[in-house]
Amino acid sequence: MDEALLRSLTPSVLGILVRRGATFAAAEDAVQDALVEAVRVWPADPPRDPKGWLVTVAWRRFLDTTRADVARRRREDLVDEEPPPGPTPSVDDTLQLYFLCAHPSLTPSSAVALTLRAVGGLTTRQIAHAYLVPEATMAQRISRAKRTVSGVRFDQPGDVTTVLRVLYLVFNEGYSGDVDLAAEAIRLTRQLAAVIDHPEAAGLLALMLLHHARRASRTAADGSLVPLAHQDRSRWDTTSIAEGIRILQAALARDRLGEYQAQAAIAALHADAPTAEETDWVQIVEWYDELTRLTDSPVVRLNRAVAVGEADGPRAGLAALATLDDSLPRHTAVAAYLHERDGDLATAARLYVEAARRASNLAERDHLTRQAARLNARR
């Protein structure tokens, strides 16, 4: 069973059902039923046209549900519009669905969560991790969003800001999480930047390109993580870096600074440094100051503490870190790194072990465990 194929077809099939008159919640339920049926049937009898098969089965499930709902019995006349079997035209509805999910009836945070779950392909656990909340809390948020829009016709697209936030979170999960969604996020953001005049759309595209350009060097042959300072910069994609910097410069020239442009400026400074030692950390701290002003995000302040530690020394970094909640993800790992830089290897090793226990994925856990072992071997 090709799970990647099923994920890639889901947004388009969902879009077809919505355009045919289904509410989003009903369409999502029908598509989920069709996916379950595909998992059961396809291994023994794979269809010649997977998308057409999913559309047909999902539409039938939607019609069956509609007939059973007395309050919506009027929709029974849609039975004759059931799509015939055979090839279905390929239409990319994904970006449109992102806008439709950002519905005015939802708060921005609920719209983002719903879109990530229903269209972005992320699990509730992944979304909860991105929002720094318990999985149960995020599950309730998504359920409330579904109930809110259960009877809504999606003819009022949401705003660009919400869509940009969704694309940003999808890229982050694809870049560092369990599911590879980064390339899809770049594709959709490129589409969005091409059709709207919005400097933050350009800033987000630049940010994605600059981060994605380093992807080949982020892991070693054995799958272990390679920190930025130790990456082989000859493996960075210079074409993507050049494009990202060009897009960023054009966005910054409009003097409408936003958080994605600020993040892209930080990524550009890393990409522009010939070696880790030549990184302009002072300017990176200045950009983190701008980003803090724009977002007041604890994660931004955590990353700023690292930059301060590089620019002004590890004790300055530890002082900045001391102002933050130590329950933040990666807080302990940052503390370990700064203590190591300050020469306190015993404390650093202990903190690396603690950070490994808190790590959210296996690759990060293994990396932190190796760091602890390396320091313990030197003592």
Image (cartoon, rainbow, N blue to C red):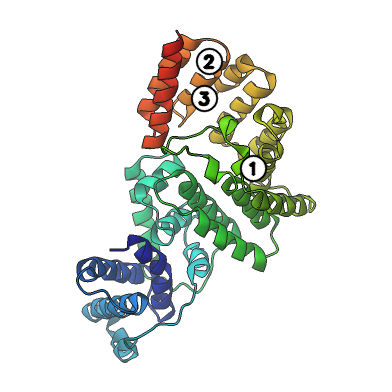
Q: In this view, does 91 lie above or below 142?
A: below
Report helix, strand or loop for mark 2: helix
Q: Residues within 10 Å of mark 2 (few under 14, many from 20)?
A: many
Residue 32 image-quadrant placement: bottom left
- Which image quarter holds the N terminus? bottom left
Q: How crowded is mark 3: few (under 14 residues within 10 Å), some or many (20 or more)?
A: many
The amino acid type of the residue labelled 3 equals: Val
Q: Where is residue 40 in the image (x, y as percent from the top left)?
A: 20, 67
Is residue 115 something one can see in this rendering?
A: yes
Which of these two is toward me, 206 or 319?
Answer: 206
The amino acid type of the residue labelled 1 equals: Gln
Which of these two is toward me, 151 or 294?
Answer: 294
Dot label at residue 263: 1
Spatial CA span between label 1 and label 2: 26 Å
Dot label at residue 334: 3
Spatial CA span between label 1 and label 3: 19 Å
Identify the residue shown where x is 21% and y is 78%. 68
Q: Is the Cβ of the residue at disc 3 closer than 8 Å to that at disc 2?
A: no
Q: Position of residue 339 (x, y in %)?
A: 53, 15
Report helix, strand or loop for mark 1: helix
Which of these two is toward me, 183 or 188?
Answer: 183
Identify the residue shown where x is 42% and y is 68%. 11
Q: Position of residue 374 (x, y in %)?
A: 44, 18
Left or right: residue 335 versus residue 66 is: right
Report helix, strand or loop for mark 3: helix
Spatial CA span between label 3 and label 2: 9 Å
Q: Circle 2 sits on which residue?
A: 339
Sequence order check: which comes first, mark 3 or mark 2? 3
Q: Is the Cβ of the residue at disc 1 closer than 8 Å to that at disc 3?
A: no
Residue 70 image-quadrant placement: bottom left
